Amino acid sequence: MSDTAQRNESEPAAKTSADEQRKAAMKRGGGDPGTRGRTTIADGVVEKIAGLAARDVLGVHAMGSGMSRTFGAVRDRVPGGTKSVSRGVKAEVGEVQTAIDLEIVVDYGVSISDVARDVRENVISAVERMTGLEVVEVNIAVSDVKLPDEEDDDSESRLQ
């Protein structure tokens, strides 16, 4: 019984000691180490996340207008060039919120309203999860419908 009594008496002392250490650390450093400093997220980061999330939705054929897809296809074929995942995406990023504009091409036969809803859900989920920013709006402009018998704008036959 004396061992139990000693353990119970020492536990509050250990807890008090930990509380005192935490208070001392907060006085020294100004709070939780995870909140010290500032994190800024560039517009391009949000645009890449949103572009990839939008492309993952079934029914989205491409991103951007016809002209931007054509120029992008040429740029993609230049040696050393990289594929632009943010084509058709514009983001405005503030300190805690962001707004995103998307321009998409949908496949023929899909419900545009369903695709738009799925794109919004996927983009908002990905951006908020990865950045911690609140997405206040995702505006979607459907610029074209890809017909089954049409060639892609970025096919090699058009560029030659």
Image (cartoon, rainbow, N blue to C red):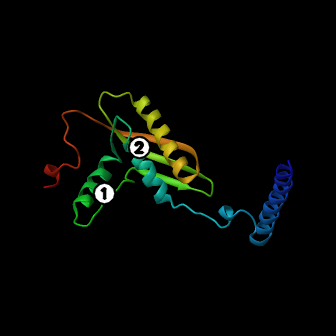
The residue beneath circle 2 is 54
x 63%, y 65%: residue = 38
Residue 71 lies, with reference to residue 55, above or below; the image says below
Q: CA distance from mark 2 to mark 1?
A: 15 Å
Residue 111, horizontal then vertical, whole percent: 38, 27
Question: Quadrant where the C terminus lies?
Answer: bottom left
The front one of 92 and 10 is: 10
Residue 3 lies, with reference to residue 80, above or below; the image says above
Residue 152 lies, with reference to residue 83, above or below; the image says above
x 55%, y 47%: residue = 128
Q: Secondary structure at mark 2?
A: helix
Residue 80, horizontal then vertical, whole percent: 25, 67
Q: Quadrant of residue 141?
A: top left
First of labels 2, 1 by sequence position = 2
The residue beneath circle 1 is 83
Instruction: Tell which residue pokes out farthest to the front in this image.
Output: 1
x 45%, y 51%: residue = 49
In the displayed structure image, the side of residue 70 where residue 119 appears, left or right: right
In the displayed structure image, the side of residue 96 where residue 69 appears, left or right: left
Of the residues shown, which amino acid type is indicated by label 1?
A: Lys
